[in-house]
Image (cartoon, rainbow, N blue to C red):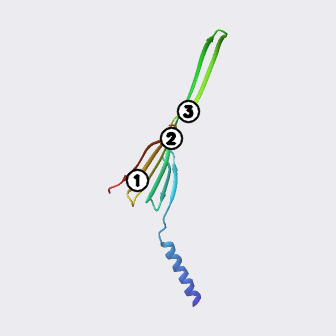
Amino acid sequence: MRKFTLTTLLYVYALISYAQQSNVNSANYEIGNGINFNFNDGDYQFNIFGFIKPSYIYGEEDIYTSDGQTNNIYRQFKSQNSNLFFTGKAAKEKLGFTIQMDYSSSNPLVEAYISYFLN
C-alpha cells in the first residue's frame, strides 16, 4: 500500500511539474533579417543585423619623365558603409530601442533612440 501511495504521489507530482508553463527562449537567423533573440515567450525581443557596402578602386597612370615612360598602378579596397544595427523591444515595459553604428566612419554612432509605446 505504501509503494502504491508513493508511486501515485510521484506520478501526480510529475504531471503537475510538466503541466507548468516554462518560459521559452529562442534564437534564429534569417537571411536579410539578421539574428533574432526572443526571451520569456517573446516579451523581450532583440535583433542584430547590418550590411557592408564594399568598393574596389583600380587606377593606372602613365607618367612621362625625361628618362622615359613609367606606369603607376594603384589598387584600393575599402568599405563605404559598414552599418550594424541593434534593436530591441520589451513588451510589458512598453519600451523599445535602436542603435545604428557605421564602423567605416570616424564617428561610428549614427543614431540611437529609445521609444515608448502608448498601447
In the rendered structure, which amino acid carries the disc numbered 2?
Answer: Phe
Q: Are there few (<14), some (14-19), or many (20+) residues within 10 Å of tag 3?
A: few
Q: Which secondary structure lies at badge 1?
A: strand
- Residue in view at x 48 percent, y 43 percent: 101
Pointer 3 with pointer 1, Cβ within 8 A: no
Foreground residue among 31 and 25: 25
Q: Earlier in the sequence, mark 1 or mark 2?
A: 2
In the image, which disc is placed on residue 51? 2
CA gap, disc 2 to disc 3?
A: 14 Å
Q: Earlier in the sequence, mark 3 or mark 1?
A: 3
Q: Is residue 41 left or right of residue 119?
A: right
Q: Locate residue 56, reporting x and y percent.
A: 56, 29
Q: Locate residue 7, reporting x and y percent.
A: 57, 83
Q: Which quadrant does the C terminus fall into?
A: bottom left
CA gap, disc 1 to disc 2?
A: 22 Å
In the rendered structure, which amino acid carries the disc numbered 3?
Answer: Lys
In the image, which disc is placed on residue 96? 1
In the image, which disc is placed on residue 112? none
Q: Earlier in the sequence, mark 2 or mark 3?
A: 2
Q: Which quadrant does the N terminus fall into?
A: bottom right
Q: Locate residue 62, reporting x and y percent.
A: 60, 15
> Compared to 27, does 10 lie above or below?
below
Foreground residue among 7 and 104: 104
Say which residue label 3 marks. Answer: 78
Q: Are there few (<14), some (14-19), or many (20+) residues within 10 Å of tag 2?
A: few
In the rendered structure, which amino acid carries the disc numbered 1?
Answer: Gly
> Seen from this angle, which residue lies furthest left?
118
CA gap, disc 3 to disc 1?
A: 33 Å
Q: Which secondary structure lies at badge 3?
A: strand
